Image (cartoon, rainbow, N blue to C red):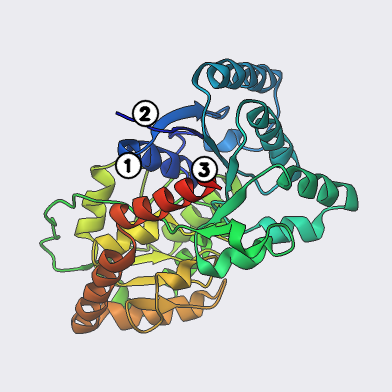
Amino acid sequence: MTAKPVVFIFGKLPPPYMGPAIATEILLQSPLKNDFELIHIDTKTNTDLRQIGSWSFKKLIKNFKIYLYILRKGFALKPRLVLIPISQSTVGFFKDSLFILISRIICRKVLLHLRGSEFKIWMDRSNFITRLYVKSIFRLCAGVIVLGNNLRYLFKGYFPEKEIYVAANGGDYALPAPQKSENGKVNILYLGNLQSSKGIEDLIEAIKLLPQDVSQQINVDIIGGWRNEMTQKKCLDTCNTYQLPVTFHPPEKSPQKLQYMANADIFVFPPREPEGHPWVIVEAMAAGLPIISTDRGAIIESVEDGINGYIVPLADPKSLSEKLIELSTSPDKRKRMGLASRKKYESGFTLATMTINLKNIFNQVILE
């Protein structure tokens, strides 16, 4: 029997619960392990969302230990391919570039994975030396994976077209039976980190703008961890002052998270800033929910305005409020859009589809 090619998968695992960490967890548990020997290289140095972006001597020592581990593991297992998610900040990329340089010592093929969409913004703001360094590091790599066709443009001028691969997020979800509230109210769900860039303030403002007769007919569950104390205070004060029908919950793991999805009637995730392809959008499609979101990253490849939800303008609570009213007061429209979400999920965002895409990319890069 031919041995499976060894593939190193770099990345963090939750907690904290963030898109990249969830992606790493899903990749490692996916059917890719049937075709490749997946070896996880844990790069986590933060245990809490509030630690992200901070520096400490402890983190420095931990990174040094990771570098030594990569070398030791690499020389022992001789991987055919190394998959490295890249940061979109100067400090973060410098750390990632050391992973890339070390990986080239142990492996000829290094494939990058961008799990966001801020790369071009960061490059446009960077100085000449940073851009030159990034280009020099990219020359050592065999290509990059992005999360949607809408994101291929980010690497124009950095990689040839044939080395910019697309693999959208996908997953399999065992959704529990819904537990609908006895009062017959419409359940609205937000799931994500609670920070301004994810649109949490816009959602709170949108709920505040709802007419009283609509507000009395909804429940709003907001699940996630706070990243900023000022944002937290502002949102909680607004909810308390206006007695909004909002309940905050800490970050949830499956199956608790999926129970909230199953119970929901509408899913809202309105980020203001660049996104990749949020996992919560995939989960909401799998749950058959109408989705209200914004045109960030590859979201519009999952949410078609007027088909399985609505795309609202950025940082526009009024527009968001109008769509909440429309869906909250129209069960037929919620049902139609929810069915369209589920159909879209089944046609392109399952774990099987993602696995096939990644398997083909891995094999293509290894064989080139």
In this figure, what is the number of numbered marks?
3
Residue type at tag 1: Ser
> 166 or 283: which is nearer to us?
166
Q: In which quarter of the image is the N terminus?
A: top left
Disc 1 vs disc 3: which is toward the camera?
3
Residue type at tag 3: Ile
Helix, strand or loop for disc 2: loop
Which label's residue is closer to the chain start, 1 or 3?
A: 1
Which residue shows up at 48% across the image and 78% down it?
Answer: 312
Q: Which mark is residue 366?
A: 3
Res. 70 visible in picture: yes
Left or right: where does residue 324 sit relative to residue 216?
Answer: right
- For the residues labelled 2 and 1, the Cα–Cα distance comes to 19 Å
Residue 181 at x, y percent in the picture: 14, 60
Residue where numbered disc 1 is placed: 30
Left or right: where does residue 309 sit relative to residue 62?
Answer: left
- Do the CB atoms of the residues marked 3 and 2 lie less than 8 Å apart? no
Residue where numbered disc 2 is placed: 3
Corner quadrant of residue 109:
top right
Which residue shows up at 50% across the image and 56% down it?
Answer: 235
> 266 or 23: which is nearer to us?
23
Helix, strand or loop for disc 1: loop
Which residue shows up at 30% across the image and 42% down it?
Answer: 31
Helix, strand or loop for disc 3: helix
> 277 or 214: which is nearer to us?
277
Residue 94 at x, y percent in the picture: 74, 37
- For the residues labelled 1 and 3, the Cα–Cα distance comes to 19 Å
Residue type at tag 2: Ala
Disc 2 vs disc 1: which is toward the camera?
2
Does 80 sit above or below residue 147?
above
> 332 or 44: which is nearer to us?
44
Residue 159 at x, y percent in the picture: 68, 57
